[in-house]
Image (spheres, rainbow, N blue to C red):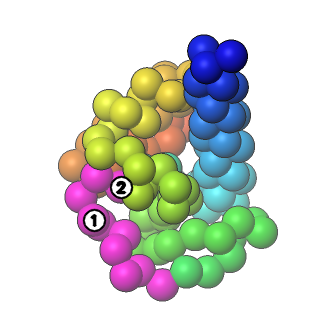
Amino acid sequence: MEIESSKLASEFVRYSLDIQRGLARKVSEAEPGSGVYVFDTAGYFDGAPTSLVAGVRVQKVGGNYGVLSSAAQNLFKSANTYFQFTSVPSEVTADSIGLKLVVTGGTC
């Protein structure tokens, strides 16, 4: 029973991160050319004001948007942990700010 609970918890996290990346894609489509981040490793978005873009709550600093999960930010200690639970790791790339949504073919 314990193994089933662990698997269920892992699948819940993966599904939640899939939804987060879907919301990030909406922001990226609404604000082409902007960086859209799903995980902040540098504290870049700490204290940034929130607003709505395409119906999604975001934090904005300069030309970058954070579509951040409070749970992931508080529980994951590194980008590697986020990658472990990401069902499609190729959808994000790491840089000095954190994990950024990868945009391909002009759209997400």
- Residue 37 horizontal/vertical position (percent): 46, 52
Above or below 81: residue 20:
below
User: Residue 87: which numbered mark, if any?
Assistant: none
Residue at point 43%, 64% (across, down): 64
Asked whether the beta carbons under mark 2 and mark 1 sit within 8 Å of each other, the answer is yes
- Look at the image and tell me whether residue 105 can be seen: no
Q: Main SS of the magenta segment? A: loop
Image position of 106 (left or right of 102):
right
Q: Residue furthest right?
A: 55
Q: Position of residue 73 (x, y in %)?
A: 42, 56
Magenta span of residues: 40-49
Kind of residue sitting beneath label 1: Gly
Quadrant position of the C terminus in the picture: top right
Q: On the rendered structure, is 103 left or right of 64?
A: right
- Left or right of 31, for residue 98: left
Give the residue at x 29% y 66%. 44
Q: What residue did someone put label 1 on?
A: 43
In-front residue for pair 59/7: 7
Q: Measuring 51% from the left and 28% from the top, which residue is drawn there? A: 85
Mark 2 highlights which residue?
40
Any magenta on residue 43? Answer: yes
Q: Nearer the viewer, residue 29 or 65?
A: 65
**Magenta span has 19?**
no
User: Residue 45 versus residue 2: which sits nearer the camera?
Assistant: 2
Q: Position of residue 102 (x, y in %)?
A: 49, 36
Q: Quadrant of the N terminus?
A: top right
SS at mark 2?
strand
Residue 15 in sight in this render = yes
Q: Residues within 10 Å of mark 2 (few under 14, many from 20)?
A: many
For badge 2, the amino acid type reads Asp
Q: Secondary structure at mark 1?
A: loop
Residue 6 vertical position relative to residue 96 in the rendered view, above or below: above
